[in-house]
Image (cartoon, helix red, strand yellow):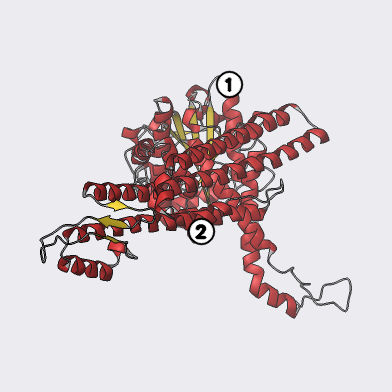
Amino acid sequence: MDLTTLNAFKPDDFEDAADGYRATAEMATAVKDTVDNQICAGIREQLKGRAADAAVSALRELSKNFHYTQSECGLVSTALNAFAFEMALAKRKLRAALEDARANNCTVDANGAVTYPPGGKEQDGKVPAGGTVTGGAGGPEDSTAATLDRQAAAIHPNPNFGKASQYADRIADALREATEADAKWAPKLRALKADDDLVVSDQDWVDTKGDRDGVLRGADTYLDTIAPPPKGGTPGQNVEWWNSLSHEQRADYLAVHPGAIGALNGLPADIRDEANRMVLAQTKAAYQLELSSIPPEPTKYQPSLNASWPSGMTTAEWRDWNSNYGDQKARLENVINGMRDIQDRFDRTGEDGLPEAYLLGFDPTGLGDGKVILANGNPDVADHVAVYVPGTYAGIEDIGDGDDRGELGRAERLWNTSSAMSPTENVSTITWLDYNAPDSVVPEATRGTYADEGGPRLYDFLQGNRAAQEHAVGTAAHTTAIGHSYGSTVVGVAAQSGSWQDSKAVDDFVFAGSPGVQADRALDLGVGADHVWAMGAPWDDQGVRQGGRLVGLGDNGIIPTDMRFGGNVMKSDSAGHSGFWDANSQSLRNQAAVITGRRQKVELE
């Protein structure tokens, strides 16, 4: 790049273009939300039949286009801001060098050469003549060249020579930096272009991750001007950091760091949802492409002499395939199944009045079981929030499995029943899976180590939930933490991880089928014994609860359904350990009464 071009360059033009792309990304986000949460939701709620299903299917594809547009336009905006920033730095360096040269009676030509005037002590009756110098390659960054320049200036009879050499080097450096920025960003910006069809394929989403990585690597100089979130920050510190950023900085940081933003407790639910949905779309596409790349599974069993019975002997081809791809295929299918369950929840918004979903946390492999935190309704503006923590065996692969839609379905029924009980208030129910749940009853679920790791994570999440609420509406919602089975142990540890009584992040605790909460008194949980609730069931639930008593998950052999624990023991009509969320059950209604603060409606033992 030459001096004239850089001098005439207008960073504001590119910043304006970045603003335009950012506005387009925000418009795409708004349209996507309208399609998903108003148009599709309205159709699901009011219409049935093949035509309605076809319309929703077509609208979902349209939504994908807007989601993809949101992601790519956000990256283009960040790239343009980064390019403008680097060019502005180079231009400021050039302008400073030109002003210094003029101040010392030097002139600069279009190629960056500096002409200096006569000066210095007379030699043989003459003042040393002026001359012209050009900047050296590398300039001040090249230590060898800098040393030679200093030596030449020291012996030159005209002191203006040394000054002019410095100006020329500074000009050359500015032009070099501008040229490098132009060469770096031109191909990156050209790469941020979609293909020419209207279908957002898995490959398209995978490409967005490559685009993001490219922008992130190139924009480090610009992004370094945006303060990162505090390392290991509390939810309050996270909120303070987010509020300190400008609208533009937030958008740029979100565009290149969606995973980090989605994981920050305390940030607004809609921001975390936006970030995590980007990660979900890219991850699901990458997993699907990897699964598609696995060779088809060959015939497993050898032919049998009796056609009525399999031979029981596996083929060599299958054994070879299974050795190379069996575990990989199972792993991919399990995680894809969980991601489809999450998407299915998004796609059912509006059915039977089901509210918009918010993905507050997502990691396909986090802590071994995967991380899924999904809310029904916006918890930031809710009057009542319930956080449901699942127990042993919970994982992303079956987060929505089963006729009752698994763990996600339980939170949905909590929302339905609670909303029906309190129709004039906003309710949000959250499935929280952000700990490594035990994968076996014995020995894993007999140990407190899983709760010791998960409890503080839950504590931080609930602190963040409170911080986001207070920032959004100025006050905290009535919040209930619900733990099932080993999840209740996690909740109990969380309750004792910090001063919940002071922070008021939780108002009530509900323990269903609890093997113990690592406390022997309801008062130890910090909310008052009258705000601690428990219920049990026969058969296998008795085994879980009494087993927890024996292995010490309840301090001093005491579990929440014991009268000596000191809490409220609710009636339950569950037939076993997994029936506390059956539709239209007394167990479900009792939980809803606690969630909505209608304690008088709770039926006690």
Quarter of the image where one finds residue 463: top left
How many discs mark residues in the rendered view?
A: 2
Callout 2 amino acid: Gly
Q: Which mark is drawn over residue 423? A: 1
Question: Mark 1 to mark 2: distance in Å?
Answer: 39 Å
Element under disc 2: helix
Q: Position of residue 15 (x, y in %)?
A: 46, 40
When the figure is inspected, residue 257 is found, relative to residue 160, above or below; the finding is above
Q: Position of residue 78 (x, y in %)?
A: 48, 46
Q: Residue at x 32, y 61 (%)?
A: 134
The x and y percentages for residue 359 are 54, 42
Please name the residue shown 45% across and 57% down the image: 217
Please say if 535 is above or below 400: above
Left or right of 157: which side holds 420?
A: right
In the rendered image, the residue lying farthest to the top is 424
Q: Answer above or below: position of 543 versus 15.
A: below
Q: Quadrant of the N terminus?
A: bottom left
Residue 240 is left or right of residue 258, and the answer is left
On the image, which quarter does residue 507 sit in?
A: top left
Identify residue for label 2: 368
Of 47 and 308, the residue lying toward us: 47
Task: Decide: is 585 above or below 483.
Answer: above
Q: Secondary structure at mark 1?
A: loop
Amino acid type, label 1: Pro
